[in-house]
Every structure is written in C-alpha cells, then in structure tokens.
Image (cartoon, helix red, strand yellow):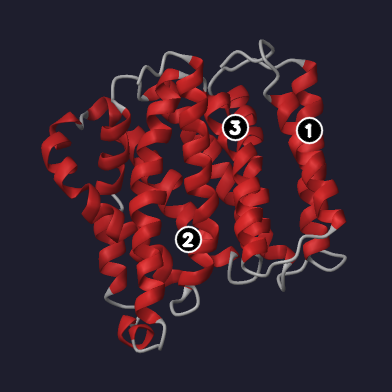
Amino acid sequence: MDLRKKQWQWAILFIIALTWGTSFILMKKALLSFSNNQVASLRIFLTFLFFFPIIITRIKKINKANLKSLLIVGIIGNAIPAFLFAKAQTQIDSSLAGILNSLAPLFTLIIGLFFYKSHVKFINIIGLFLGFIGAVGLIYKGGSGGFNMTTGGYALFVVAATICYGLTINEIKFNLKNLDGVSIAALSFLFIGPFAGINLLFINLNESFSQPEAMESFGYIVILSLFGSVFAVVLFNILIKYTTAIFASSVTYIIPVFAIFWGISDGEKIMVEDILWIIVILIGISLVNKKKLIDV
C-alpha cells in the first residue's frame, strides 16, 4: 500500500469514514445500559489497554519537543470528544451526530488559518458561511424551533467536539512531523487512559452491568474502542502524514452517509428538511476543500 498514491489515499479515507460512521450507532446501543460518562470512560480505557503493547515499545519516543503536542492530541483530540459525543447522543439521533461531525473541516481550516499560518481564498470563506448556516439549521430544527438543552442544545456538544478535532488535526500535521501515525495514536492514550480507568472506579459500573442487555452494550463499547479508536485513529493519523490537514478532515464529508444509513436501519427518521440542511453543509465544506485554493 503506497499512500503517496491518490487511489490509496481515497481508499483509506472511505475505510475511516465507514468505521467512524458506524461509531455513532455503536454509541447509541452502548447508552442503552451505560451512562454517557461510563461509555466515554470505558471507550478510552479499553483503547488504552489495546494500545498498551505499542506504548511499551515506543514510550522512548516521547521527548520535550513532542510532549505538549501529544497531550493536545490525547486530551483535546480523544478524551474530550469521547465525552462530548456520548453526552450528545443521550438526546440526539446518531444520524444527526454524524451529520454535524462534518463540520470538522471547517474548524480545521479556521484554526489552521489563525494559529498555524495556513492560507485561505475567498471561495473558502463562502464555504465556511454555508457550512455554518447548514449546521445552525440542523441544530435549530433539532431544538424544535429554538436553541434549548432538551434536544437542539445537545447538538452543540458535537460542534464543540469538531472544534477539538480541528485543533488536533493541525497539531498533528504541523507539530508532530517526526512521529509516525501509530506512535501518535498510542502515545496520546498514555496520558488519558489511566485517568479514564480511575474514573471507572467511581461511577458505579456494577449497577450498569446488572442491566439485562449490559453485556451486549459492553460488546458495542469494545467494538467502538477497537475499531473506532484504535484502528481508525491510526489510519487517520497516517493519512494526515501523507496528505493535507483539510483532505484528511474531509473524511467527515462521507461519515454522514454511513451514519444516516445506520440510523435509518435502526428506525431513525430523516426528513426532507434534514436533507436540505445536509446539502448546504456539504456544499459549504466542498468549497472549503476546493482544490488548489487552500495551502495547508
């Protein structure tokens, strides 16, 4: 597999999209028996355990030059979004979470522009506004005509997570050039996995495991950790190394397709109005990602 070739880059992009697009329905199923705090903590801790053999062999790669960046990737790029997504999906559909996740390229561009000296053209700014308009439309509709914490407000947790992703993608692209994708993924969990494990000691897992469908829900968390946080994160970090920050983040353009598919298969409903706002978002971020107009 030569990731310098475009066809392999696109193949990896679709594999990641399928994996992360499935993550939203897995979180939904996990939340049937576990709280959002438990789902996020279990996901992080299990991912840490899966990565542990790699961490042991590569821990010497941590130094003063990359410590700060690895902390950013671990805390802002993995831990905070895990809790935000789990919290959001206590009130919003998995398909809506997947749709709003497509805002990541917008924030990748904004953060890259202001903090990492990326360059932007006028057409990309138009794309930014269209993307935000589409996201606001989905959130407004989700809130039954207004922003409130009953439904629509929870969509803001997803938006916050995409901001975290935007920062992390730029950090990996510009400040972790000397670390490979596997090392970045594994070592970043060294800083958050043990704390997630400690947190699990204080959130009454016994009661959750006593639920009738607890083991099935736990199985979904294991799959979520192994594929959504280990397999996909490693591939994503590798993709960033071989492409641009914007191209890598554009995986979130494709994620909604899979998220919507799984949502519909689970009985969620997608209305015509939802589709229209989705189209607005996708048009916006396609303009953000306009070829040869962004230097990242």
Q: Which residue is mark 1?
A: 283
Q: Between 22 and 130, which is closer to the camera in this rendering?
A: 22
- For numbered disc 2, what is the local secondary structure? helix
Q: Which residue is mark 2?
A: 83
Q: Is residue 69 above or below residue 260?
A: above
Name which of mark 3 and mark 1 comes first in the sequence: 3
- For numbered disc 3, what is the local secondary structure? loop
Q: Which residue is mark 3?
A: 250
In the rendered image, residue 140, in percent from the top left (x then y), is placed at 82, 59
Name which of mark 2 and mark 1 comes first in the sequence: 2
Q: Amino acid at mark 1?
A: Ile
In the rendered image, residue 125, in percent from the top left (x then y), is placed at 77, 25
Question: Relative to 96, is 57 on the left or the right?
Answer: left
Question: Mark 2, mark 1: which one is toward the viewer?
Answer: 1
Residue lying at 44% horizontally and 70% vertically, measured from the top left: 37
Residue lying at 26% horizontally and 65% vertically, measured from the top left: 197
